[in-house]
């Protein structure tokens, strides 16, 4: 018994596709994260790796799909079971995938386009730009005020006495210009004389010396931003010291004034600048960005679609496998292999179908065995009857001849010798008939398995025809037998086949009849045959015997054994050929034999082109 | 405003033939600018000087005035050739240095500013001065010790590869994907190799 396992779900295939799917998802997430957060993502090495992977991935998937499609096309071309149904299933899967993904893609891209246009409208840009202009105006005004104050002669007049009472001067200056937050005075050698106001805005002597005269500078120290200006003030006089008498020189003092910018001004200004930069980029590259997002979407959705197609191939395989197994098993049963069974561990409807199939085949096998057994018994019964009949028939003449000879002997008849001779001849004749009958029976029952080889038909036909033409008055014609027709056959059995048919035709044709033999190449479907046609103009086959003409011991002739055509049919069957006849009672009978042509001899005329 | 319009037209043209640009993008990534490298070996260090040619001033200053930022990246790789059995593997990379300048217009300073990757800040009122600073890397010092640890310097063992990558527009996060697609968004010069000579 042949048991074929019906495959279950391919765990490896499903796992592989699941891993591929997860890899793709991770790639999408990582790549999207990089695009959305990394400022210079194109320069990073991980991006290169991701891009390479993202390029190789669809190529790999595409190659797998091309391979599967090629297999499917080949299966269809070879008419393999399940190929057409699998194609149809795949078409359905593809339609489902496209039905789901195309609207999703269009919706996503349109949503992004609409959202960008709605969120980043001209009003938003104007608002950001206006905010920056306001901040800039404020800053410029502050700068201008400080510059104007520092360069005014009035400010210098306020500095009178700064070398002696700097704190008082600072009070005066602050009273006049409350926006000032820091006041520092450095002596002629840049030693700090006085520092008033916010200490975080104070400069070191070195910084004060490096500062430019009169120029308003913006500085930031530890998150505090301020505007600073340097003034030089000449004090009235300075004694040169002992030895110089009353001689005095003006002393140069350096005054540093600073105004603090509002807390967070720098951050706010920076954010405004960045927002404006973002908006400008978005405004300028909006169309490109939407296209890029579409491409980005396609970059990852195409592999997803390809992956879905691969899953479709896998699923269709899963669906088709049990059906193909069933089809294969059904074909094997149809070819006569009733031992075929399908094993399954699935618990679905297909499993029920498989179990029903197995039960049906089992029942068929049992029934077939019964039929064979019954046929064997019937055949033996028929053979026994036939043998009994055929053996019994000659027994009567033998007995009669023997009794006649005995009577003549007992009566002392003068012609006893003559009668004895006649009787013995009759007995010997009948015994010969019995012997011939038994030989034919043995020949039929012991017909060996054919030993196939390439045989040229022309010599075989000619040899048989020559044998039967010699002593017969019947005309035998072999018109049109091609010289190069070959078949794969047992030469001895082929000769016996033709011989039996010709002999049968000659016997049917009678003394003045005609028999003709023809051989032609024919094609049925994709198989080439050699057709042997033997025709006689005898009385034909009676209608009531036509259906039994190939059965053993059925004959229309008085002295026939009824085994000739049975042997012919057996030889044709063993050679995978076909035999049939056409008959018109009182007109003619034609026997046809188709034998598969020798495939190695592919250059004989008419091969594959003859009538079917 | 005229320059701004001109700049926009450049990108509108590219927008019209985006498909073509996408196809050409990999080609465009290759050299659109060039650079020259000079190198001097000294006792305890060597100096690399790079000068960039081929960048378009109009494109840079139009973008800066419009409020966009640009970036220039100098890459310097110091490597050592492998010995014969393993020479097919190429040179052994010892150190890689990158100097990144990000330049933008600061309306609050009323100047161009260049910031470096380590937080350095340079301000420029004059465009020519900015151009000269941005597109040249004069006398970049690389100490021998940094290159090859405690080994005694043997300059003939070293080779230096340099490359310059120029982005006329630094795309903000979210739009960075455009730098892959737009052909002029990322220009790079070919790698140039020079060999370190014996110290003077």
Image (tube, rainbow, N blue to C red):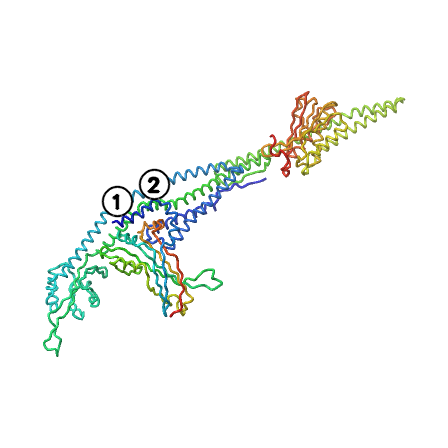
- The CA distance from mark 2 to mark 1 is 21 Å
Q: Position of residue A81 (x, y in %)?
A: 53, 37
- Above/below status of B158 relative to A503: below
Return the residue at label 2. Answer: A107
Q: Most extreme residue toward the top, as rendered?
A: A586
Whether residue A373 is visible: no
Return the residue at label 1. Answer: A121
Q: Most extreme residue toward the bottom, as rendered?
A: A243
- Above/below status of A38 relative to A560: below
Quarter of the image for residue B166 reads bottom left
Quarter of the image for residue A187 reads bottom left
Secondary structure of residue under mark 2: helix
Q: Position of residue B44 (x, y in %)?
A: 36, 69
Q: Position of residue A90 (x, y in %)?
A: 46, 38
Q: Quadrant of the N terminus of chain A?
A: top right
Q: Position of residue B12 (x, y in %)?
A: 31, 46
* Left or right of B102, for residue A408: right
Q: Nearer the viewer, mark 2 or mark 1?
A: 1
The mark that comes first in sequence, 2 or 1, is 2
* Left or right of B114, for residue A44: right
Label 1 near label 2: C-beta < 8 Å? no
Secondary structure of residue under mark 1: loop
Number of dots carrying numbers: 2
- Above/below status of A185 relative to A265: below
Residue A382, numbered label:
none
Q: Chain of mark 1?
A: A
Q: Quadrant of the C terminus of chain A?
A: top right
């Amino acid at each position: 018994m042949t048991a074929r396992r019906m495959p279950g779900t391919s765990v490896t295939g499903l796992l592989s596709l699941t891993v591929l799917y997860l890899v793709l998802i991770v790639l999408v997430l990582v790549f999207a994260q990089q695009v959305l957060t990394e400022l210079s993502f194109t320069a990073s090495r991980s991006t290169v790796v991701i891009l390479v992977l993202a390029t190789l991935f669809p190529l790999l998937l595409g190659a797998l799909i091309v391979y599967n499609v090629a297999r499917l096309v080949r299966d269809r071309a070879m008419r393999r079971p399940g190929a057409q149904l699998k194609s149809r299933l795949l078409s359905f899967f593809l339609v489902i995938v496209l039905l789901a993904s195309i609207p999703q893609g269009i919706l996503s891209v349109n949503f992004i386009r609409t959202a960008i246009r709605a969120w980043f409208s001209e009003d938003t840009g104007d608002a950001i730009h206006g905010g920056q202009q306001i901040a800039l105006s404020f800053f410029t005004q502050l700068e201008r005020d400080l510059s104007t104050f520092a360069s005014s002669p009035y400010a210098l007049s306020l500095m009178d006495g700064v070398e002696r009472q700097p704190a008082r001067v600072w009070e005066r200056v602050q009273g006049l210009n409350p926006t000032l937050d820091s006041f520092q005075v450095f002596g002629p050698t840049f030693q700090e004389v006085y520092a008033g106001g916010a200490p975080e805005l104070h400069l070191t002597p070195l910084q004060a010396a490096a500062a430019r005269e009169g120029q308003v500078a913006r500085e930031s120290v530890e998150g505090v931003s301020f505007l600073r200006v340097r003034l030089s003030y000449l004090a009235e006089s300075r004694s040169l010291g002992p030895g110089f008498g009353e001689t005095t020189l003006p002393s140069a003092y350096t005054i540093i004034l600073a105004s603090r910018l509002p807390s967070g001004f720098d951050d706010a200004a920076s954010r405004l600048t960045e927002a404006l930069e973002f908006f400008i980029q978005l405004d300028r590259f909006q169309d490109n960005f939407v296209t890029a997002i579409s491409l980005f979407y396609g970059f990852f959705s195409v592999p997803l679609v390809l992956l879905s197609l691969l899953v479709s191939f896998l699923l269709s395989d899963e669906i088709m496998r049990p059906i193909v197994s069933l089809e294969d098993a059904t074909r094997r049963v149809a070819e006569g292999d009733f031992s075929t069974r399908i094993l399954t561990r699935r618990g679905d409807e297909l499993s029920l179908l498989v179990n029903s199939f197995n039960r049906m085949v089992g029942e068929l096998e049992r029934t077939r065995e019964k039929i064979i057994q019954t046929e064997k018994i019937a055949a033996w019964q028929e053979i026994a009857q036939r043998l009994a009949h055929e053996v019994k028939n000659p027994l009567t003449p033998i007995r009669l001849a023997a009794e006649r000879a005995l009577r003549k002997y007992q009566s002392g008849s003068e012609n006893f010798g003559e009668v004895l001779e006649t009787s013995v001849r009759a007995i010997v004749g009948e015994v010969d008939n019995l012997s011939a009958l038994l030989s034919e029976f043995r020949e039929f029952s012991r017909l060996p398995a054919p030993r196939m080889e390439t045989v040229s038909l022309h010599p075989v036909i000619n040899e048989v025809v020559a044998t039967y033409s010699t002593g017969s008055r019947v005309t035998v014609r072999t018109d049109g037998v091609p010289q190069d027709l070959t078949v794969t056959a047992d030469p001895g059995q082929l000769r016996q086949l033709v011989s039996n048919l010709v002999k049968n035709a000659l016997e049917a044709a009678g003394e003045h009849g005609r028999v003709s033999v023809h051989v032609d190449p024919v094609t049925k479907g994709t198989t080439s045959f050699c057709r042997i046609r033997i025709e006689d103009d005898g009385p034909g086959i009676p209608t009531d015997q036509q259906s039994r003409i190939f059965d053993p011991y059925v004959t229309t002739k008085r002295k026939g054994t009824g085994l000739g055509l049975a042997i012919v049919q057996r030889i044709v069957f063993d050679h995978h050929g076909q035999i049939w006849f056409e008959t018109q009672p009182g007109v003619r009978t034609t026997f046809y034999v188709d034998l598969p042509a020798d495939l190695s001899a592919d250059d004989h005329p008419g091969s594959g082109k003859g009538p079917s | 405003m005229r320059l701004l319009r001109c700049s926009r037209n450049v990108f509108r043209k590219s927008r019209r033939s985006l498909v073509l640009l996408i196809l050409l993008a990999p080609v465009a990534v290759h050299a659109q600018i060039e650079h020259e490298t000079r190198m001097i070996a000294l006792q305890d260090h060597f100096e690399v000087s790079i000068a960039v040619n081929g960048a378009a001033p109009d494109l840079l200053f139009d973008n800066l005035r419009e409020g966009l930022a640009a970036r220039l990246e100098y890459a310097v790789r110091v490597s050592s050739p492998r010995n014969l059995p393993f020479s097919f593997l190429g040179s052994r990379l010892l150190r890689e240095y990158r100097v990144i300048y990000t330049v933008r217009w600061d309306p609050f300073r009323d100047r161009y500013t260049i910031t470096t990757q380590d937080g350095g800040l340079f301000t420029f009122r004059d465009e020519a001065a900015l151009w000269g600073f941005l597109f040249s890397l004069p006398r970049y010092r690389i100490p021998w010790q940094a290159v090859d640890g405690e080994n005694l310097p043997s300059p003939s063992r070293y080779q230096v590869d340099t490359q310059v990558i120029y982005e006329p527009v630094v795309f903000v996060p979210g739009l960075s994907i455009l730098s892959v697609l737009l052909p002029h968004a990322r220009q790079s010069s070919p790698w140039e190799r020079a060999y370190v000579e014996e110290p003077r």
